[in-house]
Amino acid sequence: MVQPLFLCKILNRSDIKTQDPTWRPNSMIPFINQAQENVIHHSPYRRPVSTPQYKPHPTETMKAALWMGTRKIEINEVAKPSITEPADAIVHITHTTICGSDLNIYEGDLDRSMRKGAIMGHEAIGFVEEIGSAVSRLQVGDRVIILPIIACGKCRYCEKQQYSLCDATNSSKEMNSKYGHRISGILGSSNLMGGYSGDQAEYCRVPNADLTCIKASNDIAPKKLLGLADVTTTAWHGCELAEVGKGDIVGVWGCGPVGLSIQRLAKLRGASKVFAVDKDQTRLQIAKSFGMVPVDVAAHPNVSDYILSLQPHGLDCGIEASGFRSTNTPKHAAMRYLKAESDSGDTVHAVLKSTRKGGHIALIGDFFWGTNDFPIGMLMEKGITVRGGQHFAQKVSLPFCFRAGDQANVRFCAKYYPHLLNLVVEGKYDPSWMFTYDGESVVQLL
């Protein structure tokens, strides 16, 4: 049996994303503070179309990375998944990796939304071993990238290709109560994201496989494909949200895999200068080696004032890619320590102050709950556009999913994946730079 190869991305990462430009507060808002069951009862959204937990195989087992508590991940033998619903596929995992959001779970930030024994992971590649009766775009033996996002393909958001905002694959009452809406389900995450079993395992049951898997050529190096599963598409989405274009001055807070990817892709999109903001010297040296302007927060604690001293006009585009843990001031450090806030607002404040009047900001780093002291006046008075996105808008590659005579497939085929895959195939971008450790045990890499 082929053992999965666990690949650890360079340093911690904070991540993933989309946003619905047509969103408006709806009739759910008056119910937010009521009991969760009452909120769900009044919700206009469809019941989830996919079961989070797979049907266990009656005789076969596999190894998987299981969440057993804060800072406790175990490799244990569990039942191999079976086809649970007609739209499922079973994928034999050959390569998987550790994401910054996995580290959020590992460190205990989402303990209240976790289930002991949950299979971790949401970025992997492998080969299709079995398909359900409703799967039409995959065949046994296909090499595939497994995407993190699980989407129904039929709701109002999926019709607009905003798959990560899908109405029908996440049953989380907590998210519906806190946010007023639910986003899509995600493989290997917390119950907040649907509670689906992940792909840090020898096999993975992939729900709605026609949308969740992308065919990939056998001659593309594994690390290049694995880098496309989440990080590169997330980074590209950050550039899209911030509207990074030719000649722009860009600032990126965070130099983990996503932040560094954003910086490199911003350059690829024509940005004339990119500031890389972090306090980790190793990360800053990597950013400098890629041609970025490093900004050391440790040396310049008033980072926005420092950036404005170098760039008085301000940033055209500011992108936050460090997330809720990034605390640079004593005030927010104290509030997080005392649990007076869960998400630090330090970087958001700095991005807003550094960005020019009428500029664009993308919040790509993980933020889950709430922060204090949000600079709402700065946002309004400077006329800045801010877009947030917890996940990228899932797009399926046109060359791999289109079949002659099947026009219905066209609506699933556009934008990110075909373009980014072409960049990789043509040698214009290689995401494999982000992988620094190879191994066979996620526990060792953590």
Image (tube, helix red, strand yellow):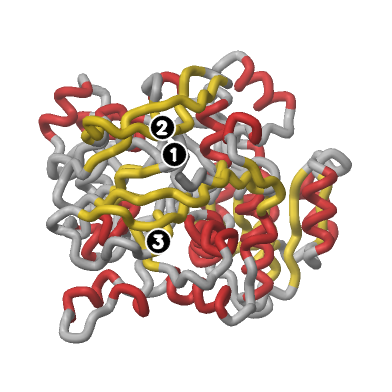
Q: Is residue 280 visible?
A: yes
Question: In this view of the protein, which residue sits in the foreground, 378 or 20?
Answer: 20
Q: Which mark is residue 144?
A: 3
| Residue sitting at x 61%, y 22% | 336
Could you tell me the amino acid type at mark 1?
Answer: Ala
Q: In the rendered structure, are the residues bearing label 2 and label 3 in contact, judged by CB atoms less than 8 Å apart?
A: no
Q: Residues within 10 Å of mark 3 (few under 14, many from 20)?
A: many
Separation (CA) of disc 1 from disc 2: 8 Å
Could you tell me the amino acid type at mark 3?
Answer: Val
* Whole-percent x, y for residue 335 in the image: 62, 20
Residue linked to disc 1 = 201
Which structural element holds mark 3?
Answer: strand
Which of the two labelled residues, at mark 1 and mark 2, occupies the earlier sequence position? 2
| Residue sitting at x 11%, y 30% | 41
Could you tell me the amino acid type at mark 2?
Answer: Ile
Which structural element holds mark 2?
Answer: strand
Q: Which mark is residue 209?
A: none
* Whole-percent x, y for residue 286 in the image: 80, 55
Figure label count: 3
Residue linked to disc 2 = 119
